[in-house]
Image (tube, rainbow, N blue to C red):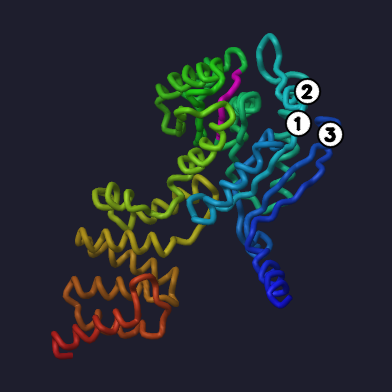
Amino acid sequence: MKKYILLIITTLLAFPTFSQIKYEEFTSAKLGESRRLKIQLPRNYDTNTDKVYPIVLVLDADYLFEPVAGNVDYFSYWEDMPESIVVGVMQGNKRYDDGNYDDTNFFPAETGAAFFEFLGLELIPYIDKQYRTAKFVIAVGHDFTANFINYYLFKDPPLFNGYISLSPDLAPMLDARLPERLAVIQNKIFYYLATGTDDIKDLMEISEGLNTSLQAIDNKNFNYYYDNFEGATHYSLVGRGIPNAMEKIFSVYRPISKQEFADVLMKTDIPIHQYLIDKYKTIEDLFGLTNPIRENDFLATAAAAEKRKKWESLREIATLAKKQYPDTVLGDYYMGRYYEEIGETKKAMRTFQGAYDKEEVDFITIDLMLDRAEKIKADFGY
């Protein structure tokens, strides 16, 4: 009995750390009816009251919501993408009416035009008003709805910043219109396209042809990614495409990896501290997020500065770390290392000693700091 009670208490205490999923009925004037929404809020959304979140809009949410929401929660837990609000539109057997297009110009018509306006003029403004949102929206669709999300690229500016198009069933002429539009688009766009070798034959050929056209686009605003999964069917490619799309679209957001360290930090001509600043400015510009620099990224850039003997960059990194994490040893350690390397050993010793009451970070312990101070004292007789 005691174990049972303890399990309940543990579950209740842990509950706030899980993503919150809720259903809402949204009455649409454009559609003349209500639509059911399924919404996943990030972990601790209610307690992080100053934080804003990108939106991931999921069409075909009757079956697409869970794989998208699960991947968003997983990737954001490990900081490989920002925490995001996932909004699913339940469509059921209305998906074909929602995606209806004109037989002449092949753009949304009648029920399709109403659904187009519902998403752009009602739903997204409602989510922006109801929740704390950042100005970055990704749309996800599969076959018929993957076709539909493309129509928003022809708005100026486009409604969405990112497009995850899973085995699209393209409307006539869209395979030609899309490359023409994306070649001249002025807004930063992330576009992911996926098919599989065992996809429906016609749809696989559509994706392969579209990929050939999109690969040829030379536009710095157009960020394009493509996968053709070996052995994947029309339905199994969804489970492989969604995490690949998230990983690629949010690649700049991720903490500095071993590969980025080796291929970029150890080779870049940009001052290493400036690379760090630029990385977070890019995150702010792209996703509307003013995130603090991660401790991991301070450690990575400082290590690169030490290995490459870029001591002025190390000083700048230490200054940033002291400002951002004043209660930790992070900035003091690297400032002490800077003073050591430029020959100001007494300043280095005092800097190491001065951090004795601060929080340790990774390998930078109080003992390490004091040992370095003692070594300087012994070597120079202070």
Q: Say which element carries label 2.
A: helix
Where residue 205 appears, as percent x and y from the top left, is: 50, 16
Viewer-proximal residue among 190 and 197: 197
Q: Is residue 365 above or below residue 161?
A: below
Residue type (three-letter) at the residue carrying disc 3: Ala
Tell me the quadrant of the picture where the N terminus can be found.
bottom right
Q: Is residue 203 above or below residue 264?
A: above
First reached walking from the N terminus: tag 2 or tag 3:
3
Category of crowding for the residue at label 2, using alpha-carbon neighbours closer than 10 angstroms: few (below 14), some (14–19), many (at least 20):
some
Determine which of the numbered discs, if any, sits on residue 255 in the image.
none
Residue bearing the label numbered 1: 92
Report the magenta residues as a range.
163-170
Q: Say which element carries label 3.
A: loop
Q: CA distance from mark 2 to mark 3?
A: 13 Å
Residue type (three-letter) at the residue carrying disc 2: Thr
Where residue 83 appears, as percent x and y from the top left, is: 57, 53
Residue bearing the label numbered 2: 111
Category of crowding for the residue at label 1, using alpha-carbon neighbours closer than 10 angstroms: few (below 14), some (14–19), many (at least 20):
few
Residue bearing the label numbered 3: 29
Q: CA distance from mark 1 to mark 2?
A: 15 Å
